[in-house]
Amino acid sequence: MTTRSDWNAWAAGRETARITDWLREISEPDWSATVNHPLFDALAEGRLSGEEFAAYMVQDYGFVDPFTALIGHAIGQAPTMDDRVVLGQFMGMLTSDENSTFQRTFEAFDVPAAQRKAPDYLPQTLAFRELLRDTGQGGGYAEIMAVLVVTEWIYLEWGLRVTRVDGLHPLMGEWIDLHDNPSFQDFVAWLRRRLDEEAEGLDDAAFACMAERFRETVAKERAFHDAVMPD
């Protein structure tokens, strides 16, 4: 179990020490393996077929419903109206712009209606869905924020990292754009700052739960992307 003592030892002697930087470091090698996943390079370089991209998006869309619920729990537990405003704005983007990208992808690549309504989820998708539900229903605000930091920060990092080729399918480019734009960068910076602040005030037990939830989420991100990577 990762403890506050581990954080204190890591932070000692550092001029600038952020809890979120430490959480990322203790989540290696899963963090870097996910950010640098070959799936994202294949996507940006146009090496995913339409069928492969659609199959990936069907699995990823499986997170939208429990993730939206998780944000709802975060809004309910948020300690300030300022937090609720930022999280509510993100909820609006998720249920409009991002949801639209998914739906238009399914249309463009002829995903059957039955697969949209009742997808055949991979075990790794189901495990991640369960983590989102479990965190929302049983986790405190800091635990929920830890999950949000992982999911959004990892996607920002891969979005910033990849270089897309000319002529990339517009929907594939749109998926990258959703995770590589100034507004999203600002949101991730806000998430990190708020988790840094919330974690400082946790008791030792809650701090350990928050850190473990962060690491578990990173591990599930890696497992999911490994599973959806085409052969």
Image (cartoon, grey):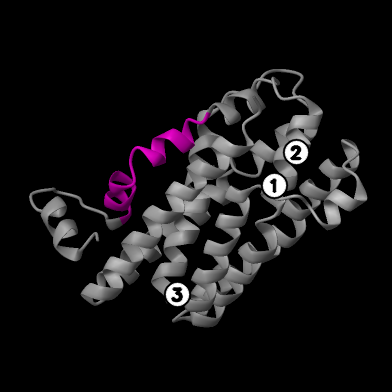
Give me the disc on residue 183.
none
Amino acid bearing label 2: Ala
Answer above or below: position of 23 versus 163: below
Neighbour class for label 3 at 10 Å: few (<14), some, many (≥20)? Answer: many
- According to the picture, the residue beneath numbered tag 3 turns out to be 139
**For the C terminus, which image quadrant?**
top right
Tell which of 88 and 108 is nearer to you. Answer: 108
Q: Give SS at disc 1.
A: helix
The residue positioned 56% from the left and 76% from the top of the image is: 73
Neighbour class for label 1 at 10 Å: few (<14), some, many (≥20)? Answer: many
Answer above or below: position of 45 versus 184: above
The residue positioned 89% from the left and 52% from the top of the image is: 114
* Region in magenta: 20-37
- According to the picture, the residue beneath numbered tag 1 turns out to be 59
Neighbour class for label 2 at 10 Å: few (<14), some, many (≥20)? Answer: many
Do callouts 3 and 1 mark residues in contact (Cβ within 8 Å)? Answer: no
Amino acid bearing label 3: Gly
The residue positioned 80% from the left and 31% from the top of the image is: 51
The residue positioned 55% from the left and 36% from the top of the image is: 226
Tell which of 81 and 21 is nearer to you. Answer: 21
Q: Give SS at disc 2.
A: helix
Do callouts 1 and 2 mark residues in contact (Cβ within 8 Å)? Answer: yes
**Could you give the CA–CA distance between mark 2 and mark 3, rounded to whole angstroms?**
31 Å
**Could you give the CA–CA distance between mark 1 and mark 2, rounded to whole angstroms?**
7 Å
Identify the residue at the far left of this view.
Answer: 13
Give me the disc on residue 55.
2
**Could you give the CA–CA distance between mark 3 and mark 1, rounded to whole angstroms?**
24 Å
